[in-house]
Image: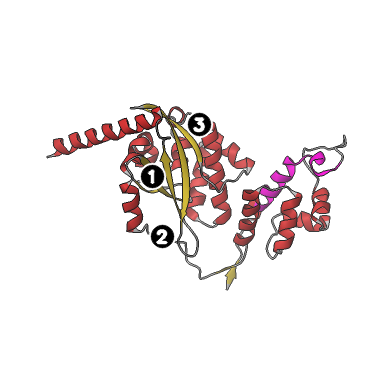
Amino acid sequence: MTTQPDNRADIRDFLSSRRAKLRPEQVGLPAGSRRRVPGLRREEVAILAGVSPEWYTRLEKGNIRGVSEDVLKAVAEALQLNEEEHTYLFELARAAQPLRRTTSRRKEAALAAPVRWLIESMSMSAAFVRNGRLDVIASNQLARSLHAPMFASDTTTAHGHANFARFHFLEPASREFFVDWEAGAAATAALLRAEAGRNPNDPPLRALIGELSTLSPEFRTLWASHDIRFRHEGIKRLRHPVVGDVELAYQSLALQTLPRPVHELSVYTAEPGTTHEERIKLLNSWTATALTEATGSAT
């Protein structure tokens, strides 16, 4: 037997939010003066996509099951979706397909030992492995020192592991730690939104989203915007309690597992020859001294 996943609300909110962001003049239509709400009308999107208004209305209500790739591409073009939004629409369609009732809950894939050896071998780069829920699965010593406020936070100790989203939205100290807190908050919510599209029936993910929505007004607002993000890269500026302001470039790489990647490796690196590199060296030295002193006091 099969069961139908119910992600209709996600589909509805995504399509309607993208439609609301498009101005008529962007698609060659007259703006007019009798529009009650911003953005395009459903029938205008239908015309642009080459489908009937009734069909598009049905799609925007979340009935995406069985829709062909060609039609989804036409809708994506009509809504002028970017590459990530286009991918997200197809992820929503995939997630809406019937599941075997006997399908077991997705298990967290074990992290291969060579990956742990790899991240621990990095001395001048902070390295994390995280899952789609933004739980930290593994980290090297520099990563733990660099993000010491997160690892020491109640949001970490209460759950037994660090989670970037919990720390960002539920820990007041994060506003001091992240120099660009607002931009980071938007990126964090968008990453979770993309993961929810891929895995709408993941209970821990839904519980995390519910927790953040209940406790954080900022998260609720960002979640309602339905912005999504798959790529996790850019510049991170941190205000570290020991070495001061640090600016780092970060990149994320998917760790290939079957049937699909469930972990990402994120690496934070300072530009060579800058004061930020010097501060990373200082943090490494400070961490080594602190570990030596802790080991000595324990013996």
* The C terminus lies in quadrant: top left
Give the overall secondary structure of the magenta segment: helix
Name the image quarter holding the N terminus: bottom right
Mark 3 or mark 2: whose residue is earlier in sequence: 2
Residue at the spot of label 1: 127
Residue of label 3: 181
Magenta residues (range): 11-29
Looking at the rendered structure, the kind of residue marked 1 is Ala
Q: Residues within 10 Å of mark 1 (few under 14, many from 20)?
A: many
Residue 207 picture location, percent across and down: 49, 49
State the mark number for residue 109.
2
Choose top left, top right, bottom left or bottom right for residue 227. top right
Q: CA distance from mark 1 to mark 2?
A: 19 Å
Q: Position of residue 84 (x, y in %)?
A: 62, 49
Tell me the crowding category of disc 3: few under 14, some 14 to 19, or many 20 or more residues within 10 angstroms, Cα based.
some
Disc 2 residue crowd, few under 14, some 14–19, many 20+, Cα 10 Å? few
- Left or right of residue 211: residue 197: right
What's the residue at 83%, 50% (across, down)? 43
Element type where label 1 sits in the image: strand
Q: Residue at x 70, y 45 (%)?
A: 18
- For label 3, the SS is helix
Viewer-side label of 1, 2: 1
- Label 3 – label 2 distance at C-alpha: 31 Å
Residue type at numbered disc 3: Trp
Q: Quadrant of residue 29?
A: top right
Q: Are marks 3 and 1 in contact (CB under 8 Å)?
A: no
Query: Which amino acid does the dot numbered 2 rest on?
Result: Ala
